[in-house]
Amino acid sequence: MNINGETNVYGIIGNPVSHSLSPLFQNYFLELGQLNGVYVPFHVERDSLTDALSGLIALGVRGVNVTIPYKEDALRHIITDAESAMVGAINTIKFEDGQTTAKNTDWIGVKDALIGIGAGTGLEDSDVLMIGAGGTARAVIHALENMNAVKISICNRNTERLNQLLAHARLNYPRVKFTSIPWEHTEVEQASNSASLVINCTSVGLHGEPFPFAIKGKGFAFDIVYEKKGFTSFCQQAHKCGRVYADGLPMLIAQGAASFVWWHGGQTPDKLATMRWIEQKLGRSQMLLPGWEAAG
């Protein structure tokens, strides 16, 4: 990487942000594309989001990803597309020609990751269980509806947040049947037994804490949380119950690739090659991604 007076700056804003793997693979994308740019993390305190966005513009930063806890808050500050407005959160911002625009590529990352692990078909004939109702849950629902899912059950510890998500989902995705599940072992495990796909949309496991439910049943289990060794507490439970599982690393790479294309144009970076490169850097085993391998 050669930084000079013409190097374009990109980054990620969040709190915390020091754990993020985005700088690792976004700089890899820049290197592969032979682009004069650098991608860096920006820690932003919660009461400083407006000032941070103004500062990024003033400094000539070209674009940023947005992570926890700003994906919903940032939406109120920026012009966005109809799709991101429907999701209700953004994760990518572009500063170009005096304009600040934003979009959501998280849902693209969810869809691509599910296709990658082999869970991209048959959702119109099966049940999906979502655990958690945070900001990323809306992107997950958008992806599932795009993949023809018609029955989605959701549980969340905070019932107010769950009801808000259900109201949003029923309004925007009327062809999908949404069901609420109590945050109780018996109820969750019964719903899991009948679901071909279980998705963790909580942050449980981000700091190594145990996952509260067994992920019973057959099929797939997908965690939006990623862990350097690829074995989050949710994935551990899924493994015990015999499910095909994946942590959030393929989603992270896929949403980042979509952001990269929006900023720079051109072809989508090779997601599978990037996944293998990062796995090697982190010293983790290769994840089975038959969908990505079949796509070449």
Image (spheres, rainbow, N blue to C red):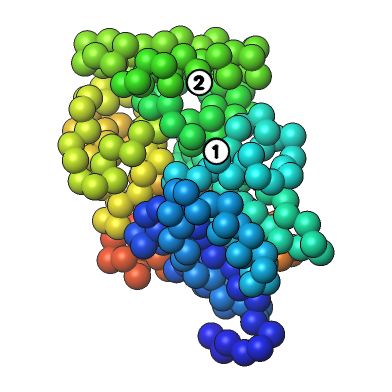
The percent coordinates of residue 32 (x first, y second) are: 59, 75
Is residue 296 in view from this perspective? no
The percent coordinates of residue 270 (x first, y second) are: 58, 62
Q: Work out whether mark 1 precedes mark 2 in sequence or the reverse, and give the earlier one.
A: 1
How many circles with numbers are drawn on the protein? 2
Q: Examine the rendered structure and indicate whether residue 179 appears above or below residue 86.
A: above
Residue at the spot of label 1? 72
The percent coordinates of residue 74 (x first, y second) are: 59, 45
Q: CA distance from mark 1 to mark 2?
A: 13 Å
- What is the three-letter code of the residue carrying label 1? Glu
Which residue occupies 40% across, 58% down? Answer: 17
Which residue is more in the foreground, 209 or 79? 79
Crowd class of label 1 (few under 14; some 14 to 19; many from 20; radius 10 Å): many
SS at circle 2: helix
Q: Which mark is residue 165?
A: 2
In front: mark 1 or mark 2? 1
